[in-house]
Structure formats: structure tokens, C-alpha cells
Amino acid sequence: MPMLGDSAPSFTAETTEGTITFPSDYFGKWKIMFSHPADFTPVCSTEILELSEMQEEFKKLNTQLLVLSTDGLNSHIEWVRSLEKIQAEDGRKVGINFPIVPDVGLEISKKYGMIHPRMSSTKTVRGVFLINPENKICAIFFYPASTGRNLEEIKRTLLALQESDKNNVLTPANWYPGDDCLISSPSSREEAEKLAKKNDPNLYSKDWYLWYKKSK
Ligand code: BEZ
């Protein structure tokens, strides 16, 4: 099971968007991989529909979406057709423009630790892997098959990771873009006093170890 900071395990697969080699084809982009227990299932279908509504937002965030489901490619193609038909009937023409990866033999699912045997030995749990432009795993979520994922929270986590990367900050509980961030704690009260003496107008503290950086 890969851990945070590990290189994302690599694989080559025939997907609904052609052959891909992951993650190397997407070096330089953020990547989010979602695993699904099966095609043509209600919770998974709502997640894919929701993801397709958000795919342009993720594209603007330099992020490639990728979905893995333990069914085969023909099943994926039929599932995409069905979901696009649902979208068309709802008056939407967004399309599902991210690869859906088959994994009938479970090789990829096992590489990523997505099979949790006490839940199922043949179907993945709902895994989410956020992978940075250098192909390192930055965040992992696991949900049970019965619970649809909160895609807004996954986007929020991506934005927080991007903020930390760009501005060398930490993000507090419930942070959203535009909120103040945190900086690493000074290593001692003496270091905190030195920081306080700098009177940096962009910083404020609640105690010696708790320093905020203003967003504006
Ligand atoms: C679903 O996506 O609806 C689902 C998939 C596997 C087990 C239970 C529900």
C-alpha cells in the first residue's frame, strides 16, 4: 500500500481515452485518481456525473482526473455511453472526457492498496489519490462502497496542497481559498519573540506557536 510521499505506482492501460502510462504521461500536472467498485452502480454513477460537471474546473487547476473501476474496457465504454445519455436527457452536453481505466485482474487496485479484503476481495473501496506534478502521492482518502464522495472536499484539498506548494504555508481547519493561512511554528519561545520583533504586517499570532499569514 503506497503512503504519502511515495512515488505513485506506475501502470500502462487501455482506457476509454486510449492507451495511457500513468503517472508519467502526466508529469508536470496534478493528478487525482478515483477508484470505483464497479460500473453501472448507482453511487459510482452519481460520482462520475458530478466529476464530469467539474472536469473543466480541474483542468484549469492543471489537474488530470483518472477513474479506475474493476470492470473491463467494453463495460466502461457502455457505462460512459449510458452516463452521457443521462446528461443529454438532462439537457447537458458535458461528456466524460477523462480516462476510465479497466482493472479486471486487480493488478492496479492491488498496487494502490485499494482492495480491503474484509470489505471485498474482488472490488475496490472508494479510493482517492492526489498526486503532485512530480508524481508523488500527497493525499489519500478511502470511503466505503456505500458512501458517495464529497468532490468539493477533494477539490478543496487539492487547492490547499497547491497553496502550500506555491506559498510555503500550511492551511488551517476548514480553509478555503481567500482565508488566512498558517506558517510553521517557531521552534521556541525565543524564536517566536524574534519573529514578533520583525513586526511583519502580513503575520499575526494567537500564541507563540500559532502564527497566521494574512491572505490579503
Ligand atoms: C454503488 O456505486 O452504488 C455501489 C457499488 C458497490 C457496492 C455498493 C454500491
Image (spheres, helix red, strand yellow):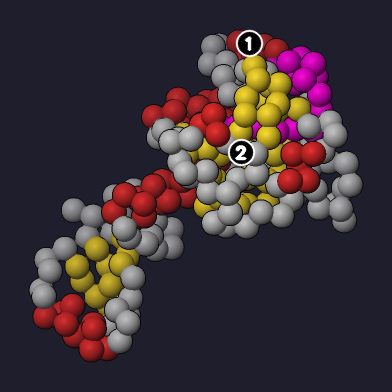
**From what the image shows, is residue 76 above or below residue 148?**
above
Residue 22 seen in the current view: yes
Give 153 or 167, whichever is nearer the viewer: 167
On the image, the x and y values in percent for residue 148 come to 67, 42
Question: Hey, which quadrant is residue 68 in on the image?
Answer: top right
In the image, 2: left or right of 167? Answer: right
User: Is disc 2's CB within 8 Å of ligand 1?
Assistant: no
- In reply to whether residue 170 is colored magenta, the answer given is no
On the image, the x and y values in percent for residue 184 come to 33, 70
Q: Which amino acid type corresponds to the residue marked 1 in the rendered image? A: Glu
Residue for badge 1: 89
Identify which residue is drawn at 60% across, 10% down.
Answer: 88
**From what the image shows, is residue 150 above or below residue 49?**
below
- Determine crowd level at label 1: few under 14, some 14-19, many 20+ residues with C-alpha closer than 10 A: few
Give 9 or 157, whichever is nearer the viewer: 9
Q: For the residues carrying marks 1 and 2, which lies nearer the camera in this image?
A: 2
Q: Which mark is residue 33?
A: 2
